Image (cartoon, rainbow, N blue to C red):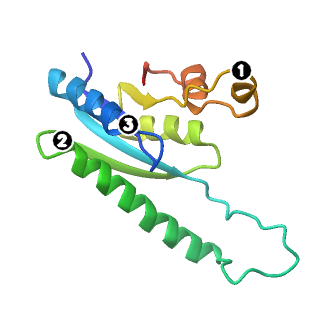
């Protein structure tokens, strides 16, 4: 059915249970899993009047972001194991959902498999769901786990 599953990962968004579901789907179809981690290209802004000792230049920020993404992707890849072909993408985009869709195009994925925060009520109104945004704007199917 599917030959290339795009799975967005972050330290808090995809659990072992959900990753196992993506692995099961990939094994059933002998599909590849393409992992993506999306980083905001803009350095987080501090409104403090005093220059923080922790502030980074854009070059340093990009280096730190790339190293962090590499660790997150490596951890997810290790959890998947060696039975499945795995691709990795680190995308810089100010909007996570658009970054996921961009990665799906680059990976030539035929489905996006992602977790949902399951936000409802006022929390759902004020803290939008990335899964909902991807579903609304993706041109390929989106499978939401959780």
Q: Which residue lies most toward the top here? A: 1
Of residues 101 and 48, the one nearer the viewer is 48
Residue 132's quadrant in the figure? top right
The mark that comes first in sequence, 3 or 1, is 3
As helix, strand or loop, the secondary structure at mark 2 comes to loop
Task: Name the side, left or right, on which 134 lies relative to 56.
Answer: left
Q: Residue at x 68, y 77 (%)?
A: 55
Q: Of the residues tagged 2 and 3, which is closer to the observer?
A: 3
Assess disc 3: are there few (<14), some (14-19) or many (≥20) residues with their C-alpha within 10 Å of its C-alpha.
many
Q: Position of residue 106 (x, y in %)?
A: 41, 41
Q: How many marks?
A: 3
Q: Which residue lies most toward the left here? A: 83
What label sits on residue 85 in the rendered view? 2
Task: Name the side, left or right, on which 72 lies relative to 26.
Answer: right
Q: Of the residues tagged 2 and 1, which is closer to the observer?
A: 1
Query: Which residue does the numbered mark 1 point to in the structure image?
Result: 121
Q: Position of residue 102 (x, y in %)?
A: 50, 39
Q: Position of residue 104 (x, y in %)?
A: 43, 35
On screen, 118 above or below 100?
A: above
On screen, 90 above or below 14?
A: below
Q: Residue at x 43, y 30 (%)?
A: 114
Q: Position of residue 116 (x, y in %)?
A: 51, 29
Of residues 44 and 41, the one nearer the viewer is 44
Discs 2, 3 touching: Cβ within 8 Å: no
Query: Which residue does the numbered mark 3 point to in the structure image?
Result: 7
Q: CA distance from mark 2 to mark 3?
A: 13 Å
């Amino acid at each position: 059915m599917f030959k290339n599953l795009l799975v967005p990962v972050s330290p808090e968004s995809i659990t072992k249970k959900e990753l196992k579901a993506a692995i099961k789907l990939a094994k059933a179809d002998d599909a590849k899993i393409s992992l993506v981690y999306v980083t905001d290209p803009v350095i987080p802004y501090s409104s403090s009047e005093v220059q923080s000792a922790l502030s980074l230049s854009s070059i340093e920020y990009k280096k730190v972001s790339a190293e962090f993404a590499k660790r997150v992707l490596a951890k997810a890849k290790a959890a998947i194991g060696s039975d499945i072909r795995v691709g990795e993408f680190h995308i810089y985009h100010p909007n996570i959902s658009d970054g996921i869709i961009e990665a799906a195009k680059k990976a030539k994925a035929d489905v996006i498999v992602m977790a949902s925060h399951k936000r409802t009520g006022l929390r759902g109104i004020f803290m939008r769901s990335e899964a909902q945004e991807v579903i609304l704007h993706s041109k390929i199917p989106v499978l939401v786990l959780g």
